[in-house]
Each structure stands twice: as structure tokens, then as C-alpha cells.
Image: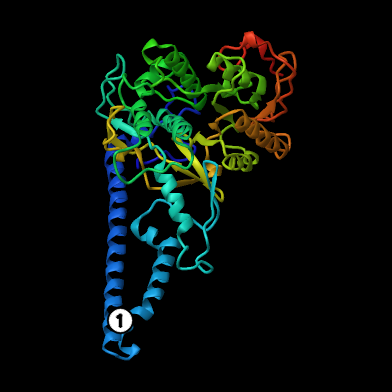
Amino acid sequence: MTSLPERGAAPPSDLPSPSRRKGDAATAAVASSSASEDIGSKHCKGSILSSVFTIFEAQQDSSSSVAAAAACENKSPGHSSGPSYGGAWSRALRRFVGGGSMWRFLGCAKVLTNGDVWFLGKCYKFSSEESSSDLDTDSGHAAFLEDFSSRIWVTYRKGFDAISDSKFTSDVNWGCMVRSSQMLVAQALMFHHLGRSWRKPSQKPCNPEYIRILHLFGDSEVCAFSVHNLLQAGKSYGLAAGSWVGPYAMCRAWQTLIRTNREQPEVSNGNESFPMALYVVSGDEDGERGGAPVVCIDVAAQLCYDFNKDQSTWSPILLLVPLVLGLDKINPRYIPLLKETFTFPQSLGILGGKPGTSTYIAGIQDDRALYLDPHDVQMAVNIASDNLDADTSSYHCSTVRDMALDLLDPSLAIGFYCRDKDDFDDFCSRASELVVKANGAPLFTVVQSIQPSKQMYNQDDGSGSSGDGMADNINMEDLDGSGEAGEEEWQIL
């Protein structure tokens, strides 16, 4: 893992926005070596764990053999202590692993506590060491780690073809926001095609849909959702090789890329076209300025119907909600609300991180954010869409990293995936309940329709998102295809 900037470290003066993200340039010289050490540590941990359990099982088998021999020879039980201590050893080893001692010994980046983990809409409950039985002590941890390691992990890559007219053949130290956004969108595609319960298999051949999804995120212009194509789509929002980018601009780049992708005749067969509508939720034509975004149900419906070219059918929909939740640091009043979004079954996590460092936050435990880190450096990989025996190991990570929620950069974006109309209605119901809990400062609001002449929101003492999104109706012809009306239609008071 690359060294990260200290909290509050200012970006270079020639870069335009404090909310934009990039690895600390001062650590560029050590980035590759430190990332390699982290990957090596991860593989070492797995090897050591495997050896520990192999040795333990072998010893237990040996003890069992001794016990059996003793029984056959009618020896006193006192002469064969193996079986009587086997259960105790098993319980001790499980407590050692489940309690975090082994993970500390092996250098794991995150020691999970006994608090509940909410991970992309699913709750994992971890039993305490004292009350757990020797059979299910680690069941919660094991299930969570299996889920975590099945998520698509996208990192810095090096050695790909130069991006556009630039000389960049790597995105090390500047592409973390792009990579984080790829992870979020990849999870939406995984949930859509394979379902939330899908887990990475240990044997090949791989699932064809899984391979096709990985192909989309390869490091080449021929891969629909590559770094190359995202930067091209986001030019008008300031995306460029070697430059920082904020969550709002990143969401808009995805909007442009997906629209372009659907319009290309070569992907009209649907193999690479985006299979859902995209709604970038914003109550302001300049999302970096803050204000509570408004999810408009009528806008979402129109986007779904337009996606299907059918005024009676509701399509799956991906919602991206860019937010600014403070000035120099996140306002603490929003942290409980952010935590609760992970309990939504529609949760896709958060594009966010510490100032200057973007990550993909996929879960929470207590007051800690659990995330996949894009800052490891790996060689470029392009997986063919029909290669079911491809090596996909570089797209998965078993190392859980964490950070304190109160250290988050206030500029972030939340993602949600709704499979159908019922799922969207459930999301709206949960979001409305969250507004009630917000005490006048919601992350975002939900309305049926929007009337441009009405007040969209009130600024919250300069600290970020707040206010009530009130509206009645909006002219659908004024929408720009993303769910946002033109600048003249939004009245900011």
C-alpha cells in the first residue's frame, strides 16, 4: 500500500480543487516498493495461515491415532492425552484467530472487532470470544471475508497502452478516484448479472458473466469502461491523464461514457452495453458547491422508461449521489446517516477517502469505514470476454483496510442499485425515513416531482448538505438525460 498524505495536507497550488484526489506525489519513489511489500504480506499471510491449519490438523490426526491405538491395547486413558486436549486446542486456536491475535501476528491491516459489520447492504454479526462455541466462533468472520474477497478490486496499473495523446502508460499516483469509481460500478454490474449472494469460486471455468464484467474494466480502449475511455468521456469535466478528479466530476464522466456506450452501434447487441439506467442525483448544476441533492421519483421513472424505449416498463437503475458534507472536514452530524446507508439492500458503498486519497468504501463497523484500496500497483491486465480460464486473482483482495469515519474527505459520492420498481420504492421508503432522522440536515431528499420555481434547498451554515427538497412538478423535456434540468431551471436560495 502506498503511503498516504497526512490529514489536512494541501494539494499542489497549481491544482484547482481541494476535494480532488491523488496519491501523495512525494511518495511516488516508494509507491511501487511499498505496494509490492503489501501484496507480498497478503500472500504471506495466506501461506502462513494455510501452514498453521495444516500442521494443527496433522497434529490432531496424529493425536487421534495415538488414542485409537491406546484403546486397542486397553491402555489407561491417562496414557493417551491427545483426544482429551484436542477440543481445547481447537477452541484455543479458534479464539486466537477470531479474537484478532493471529491477524496482528501476521500483519493484517484490519483487526475486526466483535461489532456488527454492514457490508453493501448485508449484516455480519460476530460472536464474542467468551460466548462462542468451538463450532461457530469464526462463522461470521469467515462469511464476511468470503464476501469481501469476492468483490471486484480495481487498482493502479502499469504497462498499458498510452492514454490518448499522452505518454501515460500508468495511472500510479493520480488515478485512484477513477479506480474507486470502477469498483463501485463493477459491483452494480455484479449485483445485476450475478446477484448479491454470488461468491468467487475456487475452481474454473469461471462464470461467463463474471468474465465479461472483468473484461469491461480492462486497461485498453477496446474495454468499454477502461481508464482510457473514462478520461475521454470526462474531458469536459476536467478529467485528464495525470490530473486529480473529484467525485462529482467522476459521476458525470460515467454519465457521458454510458450514454456514448449505448449509442455506439458496435455494442448494440447488448454484450457490452450498460444494462441499467443511470441517475446522477444533484440539486445543483455545480455539484461541488454542496446542498442536499433531490431524488425525484418522476425523473427516475422517466429515465427508466427512456432506457427501455417503453413508457410502461421500469428498468434497473443505478443512482450516484455526489455530496459535499462539510468544508475542510466532514461535519459529524452526517456520519450516522452515512453509516445507515450501508444498511440499505440497494447499497453500493461510497466513493471517498481521506483528503487527497480516494478509496472504495464498501462497509462499516462501529465508527470505522471498511474499504478496498486502489493504491496497490499491479501490471495491466486485459481479460478476453470469452476466456473462462483467465487468471482473475489481481481483481480480488482479502486484506480489509479501515479508516475512521470522521477522517473522511467531505467530498464523496454514494451509490445505490435498484433492480426493479419494487426495489426502487423500497429505496425511496428507506431514504425518506433517513430524512426524518436527519434533524433538518439530510444527505439527500426524496420527492415525487420537482417544480423549478420552488426552493430546492437551504444552505446549512456553510457546512454542506442540508435543507428540505420541496417540489411539485417538472417538465420532463427540460431534462438532459441524466435526471438534471438545465441551469436556468434550478433556483438556489
Viewer-closest of 480 and 419: 419
| Residue at (73% x, 34% y) in the render | 440
Residue found farthest to the front: 72
Viewer-closest of 348 and 36: 348
How far across and how far down the image is residue 67, in percent?
A: 30, 81
Q: Quadrant of the N terminus?
A: top left
| Residue at (29% x, 90% y) in the render | 74
Tell me if I can see residue 477 in this picture: yes
Q: Quadrant of the C terminus?
A: top right
Question: Which of the 4 image quarters holds residue 98?
Answer: bottom left
How far across and how far down the image is residue 196, in percent?
A: 49, 39
Secondary element under disc 1, as helix, strand or loop, is: helix
Q: Is residue 28 left or right of residue 314?
A: left
How far across and how far down the image is residue 3, in percent?
A: 36, 41
The residue at which mark 1 appears reads as 67
* Above or below 147: residue 90: below
Tell me if I can see residue 358 in this picture: no
| Residue at (33% x, 83% y) in the render | 81
Q: Is residue 215 left or right of residue 294?
A: left
